[in-house]
Image: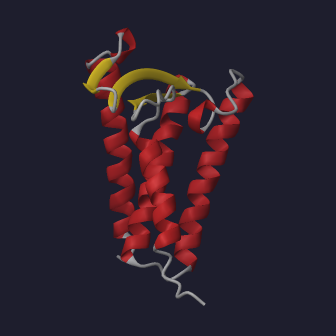
Amino acid sequence: MRYRFLLWAALAAFLIDQISKYLVVHVLRVAEGNIDILPPLLVFKYGENRGINFGLFQGNSEAARWMLIGISLAISVGVLVWLMRTAPTKLMLVCGGLLIGGALGNVVDRVLYGFVLDFLNMSCCGINNPFVFNLADVFIFAGAIGLVVFDGKKPS
């Protein structure tokens, strides 16, 4: 089973994302106030993202919510089909799994809550970052970068 690396990476990314959101939002109750972890480098702040990364395209309409769910699912299927049509390395399969698992983690949030739960805030060096994100976003970004860097093609 060649694609087990993709499956396990997707499952791990999905579970880590969902468990972290549950713990920070429902157990630590970050919505009641910020939690300083390593201030200002890492602070847990509650966020409801109804748009895409960094709150772009925020909207409260049901149409926008379902459109973003559809786009996330289409990208996940597209990455899966692309990987199945190429000769991916194990590292590419892991990166694809991270991207798909992260995307599905955010899809579950949109289905359950109508928005994506965010809680990570990082600031540094006198720059106060107002944006929050979650581990699914980290997995999506790392997976996408990994697919580009480790695409297995030799430079021409």
Q: Is residue 95 above or below residue 51?
A: below
In the rendered view, does 49 fall on the left or right side of 132? right
Judging depth in this view, the residue of 94 and 133 nearest the camera is 133
Total labels: the figure holds 0
Q: Residue at x 45, y 29 (%)?
A: 118
Q: Residue at x 42, y 60 (%)?
A: 97
- Residue 126, picture quadrant: top left
Whole-percent x, y for residue 27 in the image? 26, 19
Q: Residue at x 51, y 25 (%)?
A: 130
Judging depth in this view, the residue of 53 and 109 nearest the camera is 53
Whole-percent x, y for residue 156 in the image? 60, 90
- Residue 98, picture quadrant: bottom left
Quadrant for the N terminus, please. Answer: bottom left
Whole-percent x, y for residue 105 in the image? 45, 41
Whole-percent x, y for residue 29 in the image? 31, 15
Q: Residue at x 56, y 87 (%)?
A: 155
- Residue 89, picture quadrant: bottom left
Colour setting: secondary structure
The residue most toward the top is 32
Q: Is residue 136 above or below residue 145?
A: above
Q: Is residue 57 above or below residue 17?
A: above
Judging depth in this view, the residue of 130 and 70 nearest the camera is 130
